[in-house]
Amino acid sequence: MQNLNLLQIYQDLHQIPEIGMEEYETQQKLLSIISQMPQDFLEVRTWKTAILVHVVGQDTSHTIGYRTDIDALPVTEKTGLSFASKHPGKMHACGHDLHMTVALGILAKFAAKKPAVSLTFIFQPAEENASGGKQLYESGVLGSWLPDEIYALHDNPDLSAGAIGCRQGTLFAGTCEIHIKFSGKSGHAAFPHQANDMVVCGAEFVSQLQTIVSRRIDPVKAGVVTIGHLEAGTTGNVIAGQCQVDGTIRALTQEVNVAIQQEVRRIAEGIAQSFACQVDIDLHQGGYFPVENNENTTAEIIKYFKSSSLPYIETAPAMTGEDFGFWLSKIPGTMCWLGVDSPYSLHSDQMAPDTAAIGAGVRGFSGFLDRRAAQLAN
């Protein structure tokens, strides 16, 4: 099955989006396609909904990794496409269907021609919601297939279809979820001295958070704190006894991310003391470290794409998060953007990439991996 119908595969995958760690239909679809490729030097393992494919190279002393994510988002699709999602309330709004299709195209090329060194293809679940990369890595299932270096791509609606974007250093921010609950004493609006108002407490907390980036973080280092959800009270004449605050931290380095987390915790504890209430603090980073591209592997991939037929663009860092950052905290490697030229942003319910990017991605990355394998071969 050397000549895959990549467009059909993409459309099929687009129709069956599944949330992280629930990608059962997706896994079966991928396994079916992989099983039709030449099997002479392919080895396959599964872990939960993940798939690992090891391509045994001519030189087995080196292994290059290529990772793709396979999960979708809890978004109701509004693209109007003839091959729109068949799963209500779920959509491949972040382009993981395209990522998988490109990965299959690359894998098919190496299944047909033994590479110079071994390759491990990682079809990873739960990028969006459950630190799937961290879970898979820490499971130990890779074993001897663990790569020496690793690569991945992410679609970019702002770049022309097939263009490659990359940069040395940080490509994506690291993220951390904020979940904080203040608990005091509710009461009648007419007797505020007998209660402990968690609406005022929560409002004060959110206001003080705004000083972290402006006054506690070096102004030449990027970071952001956003509170997207605040809930307190039940009606207008009852003083709220509880307040739930949820948000996110974004930072371009792990150092800044940790510093912001420490400040959020310090402010929350201080506010709780000043309001004489209880506070539960959950700062959850999981595996969402900054995507910090390795200097050496990134120099090689930039050099390759600058000399290729695909347009190459040096891109600025983005505050979006990606759990490929966890892989890069363990294994040197590089993530690149792949342009898909869409007027709609990632996670939009109308996100529809230009499928011309699929063939470009396969050609570009299979070409790079082929050359990189030849460089590493003894």
Image (tube, rainbow, N blue to C red):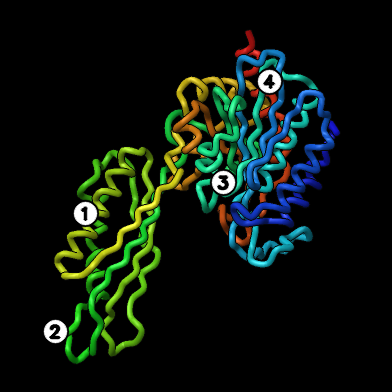
Q: Residue at x 55, y 34 (%)?
A: 140
Tell me if label 4 and label 1 are in contact, CB under 8 Å.
Answer: no
- Mark 2 = which residue? 193
Q: Spatial distance from mark 3 to mark 1, Cα to Cα?
A: 38 Å
Choose the circle earlier in sequence order: 4 or 1: 1
Task: Check disc 4 and report its element: helix, strand or loop.
Answer: helix
Local packing at callout 1 (Cα closer than 10 Å; few below 14, some 14-19, many 20+) is: few
Q: Residue at x 17, y 70 (%)?
A: 275
Q: Spatial distance from mark 3 to mark 4, Cα to Cα?
A: 28 Å
- Residue 94, given in percent of the width and then of the height, sits at 59, 51
Labels 3, 2: front one: 2
Using the image, determine if residue 338 lies above or below residue 26: above
Q: Residue at x 81, y 37 (%)?
A: 35
Q: Residue at x 54, y 39 (%)?
A: 139
Choose the circle earlier in sequence order: 2 or 4: 2
- Residue 28, given in percent of the width and then of the height, sits at 75, 48
Using the image, determine if residue 374 lies above or below residue 99: above
Local packing at callout 2 (Cα closer than 10 Å; few below 14, some 14-19, many 20+) is: few
- Residue 14, given in percent of the width and then of the height, sits at 72, 53
Using the image, determine if residue 55 lies above or below residue 358: above
Which residue, as the protein is rendered here, is positioned at the far bottom? 190
State which quarter of the image contains the C terminus.
top right
- Mark 3 = which residue? 158
Q: Spatial distance from mark 4 to mark 1, Cα to Cα?
A: 50 Å
Q: Spatial distance from mark 1 to mark 2, Cα to Cα?
A: 27 Å
- Mark 1 = which residue? 266
Task: Check disc 1 and report its element: helix, strand or loop.
Answer: helix
Give the residue type at disc 1.
Arg
Report the side of 344 relative to 246 (left or right): right
- Mark 4 = which residue? 370
